[in-house]
């Protein structure tokens, strides 16, 4: 690897999977499967680019302090971390979800807020939650948790949680209901500001290729939306714009089912 090697920080899971098509658009493939080895540094098809696998919440830290030149991180993580030293050129529109307030289905959240009651809120996202309730003028006692937030209202630890919601299935399975939508969340490309200056020639084309891929939705227009995504047991394709598409193999007999836009 050359001295001017670029390091990209990714976290395993949705962000990793949904970043792959963008890397491909920028002319790069990750040549190793992270699920088949315990390696934390992965090679790519470009000699001058490598990928480091870090915890999602550590991506901004790696990029801020130069452990990585670039990274992909959720807006939630970015807000909680703070964006000091990080250049954020692109909303990649991947790993989309929302940050919401949820309560037990038998908890009258609206009445409590109206009465000016003090709420106990459990969350991993204390900055987002504190800012949100402050903007509403609601007094809260914050309980910091690191996972399984849905348990907090069920065990009496808190009245409400602030957490990421995608399909809503996790809330539903735990008899919780979403009562406020705080913000839409998606992943951002973050770049170390010093790297951007020192490695312009390598970084700029990557940003440009990502931006071009995001703007290019050609080829996806012909697919129709047939089932709600949260009820479908089929493969999901994510296009470069971050939209989800249902992909299935259907063997229609002779009957005409309906019109598919072409
Ligand atoms: P769902 O059941 O689809 O609403 O997903 C909710 C669960 O997945 C919660 O535990 C969330 O913390 C987590 N989750 C949903 N979307 C994301 C995301 N984009 N990034 C990280 N965690 C997520």
Image: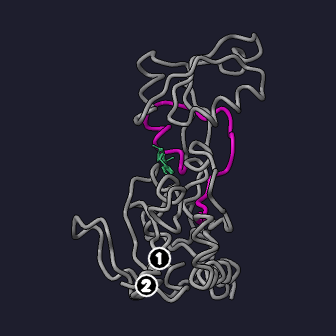
**Residue drawn at x 44%, y 71% as measured from the top left:** 235
Label annotation for residue 48? 2
Residue 137 or residue 112, whichever sits in front:
137
Queried whether the magenta region covers residue 239, the answer comes back as no
Q: N-terminal of the two: label 1 or label 2?
A: 1
Q: Whole-Å distance between the Cαs marked 1 and 2?
A: 6 Å
Q: Quadrant of the C terminus?
A: bottom right
Residue 189 or residue 121, whichever sits in front:
189
Marks 1/2 in contact by CB < 8 Å: the verdict is yes
**Residue drawn at x 45%, y 15% as measured from the top left:** 156
Horizontal arrangement in the rendering, residue 162 relative to residue 50 (left or right): right
Can residue 223 be seen here? The reply is: no
Corner quadrant of residue 17: bottom left
Numbered range of the magenta stretch:
166-191
Element at label 2: loop
Query: What is the crowding at mark 1: few (fewer than 14 residues within 10 Å), some, or many (at least 20)?
Result: many
Query: What is the crowding at mark 2: few (fewer than 14 residues within 10 Å), some, or many (at least 20)?
Result: some
> x%, y% of residue 216?
68, 84
> x%, y% of residue 93?
63, 65
Residue 2 or residue 29, whichever sits in front:
2
Element at label 1: strand
Task: Mark 1 and ligand 1: say if the CB distance to the nearest ligand atom is below 8 Å.
Answer: no
Residue 20 or residue 224, whichever sits in front:
20
**Residue drawn at x 50%, y 89% as measured from the top left:** 27
Can residue 231 be seen here? The reply is: yes
Q: Quadrant of the N terminus?
A: bottom left
> x%, y% of residue 81?
56, 45
* Residue marked by disc 1: 6
């Amino acid at each position: 690897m050359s001295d001017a090697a670029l390091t990209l920080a990714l976290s395993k899971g949705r962000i990793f999977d949904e970043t792959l098509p963008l890397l491909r658009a920028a002319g790069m493939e990750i040549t190793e499967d992270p699920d088949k080895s315990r390696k934390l540094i992965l090679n790519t098809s470009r000699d001058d680019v490598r990928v480091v696998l870090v915890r999602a919440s550590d991506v901004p830290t790696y990029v801020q302090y130069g452990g990585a030149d670039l990274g992909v991180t959720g807006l939630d993580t970015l807000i909680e971390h703070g964006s000091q030293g990080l250049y954020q050129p692109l909303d990649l529109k991947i790993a989309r979800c929302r940050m919401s307030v949820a309560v037990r289905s038998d908890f009258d959240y609206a009445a409590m807020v109206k009465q000016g009651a003090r709420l106990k809120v459990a969350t991993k996202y204390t900055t987002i939650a504190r800012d949100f309730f402050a903007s509403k003028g609601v007094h809260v006692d914050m309980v910091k948790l690191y996972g399984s937030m849905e348990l907090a209202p069920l065990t009496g630890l808190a009245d409400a949680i602030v957490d990421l919601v995608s399909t809503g299935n996790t809330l539903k399975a735990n008899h919780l209901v979403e009562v406020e939508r705080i913000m839409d969340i998606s992943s951002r490309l973050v770049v170390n500001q010093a790297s951007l200056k020192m490695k312009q020639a390598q970084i700029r084309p990557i940003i440009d290729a990502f931006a071009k891929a995001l703007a290019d939705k050609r080829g996806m227009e012909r697919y129709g939306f047939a089932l709600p995504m949260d009820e479908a047991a089929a493969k999901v394709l994510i296009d470069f714009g971050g939209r989800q598409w249902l992909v299935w193999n259907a063997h229609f007999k002779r009957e005409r089912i309906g019109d598919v836009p072409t």
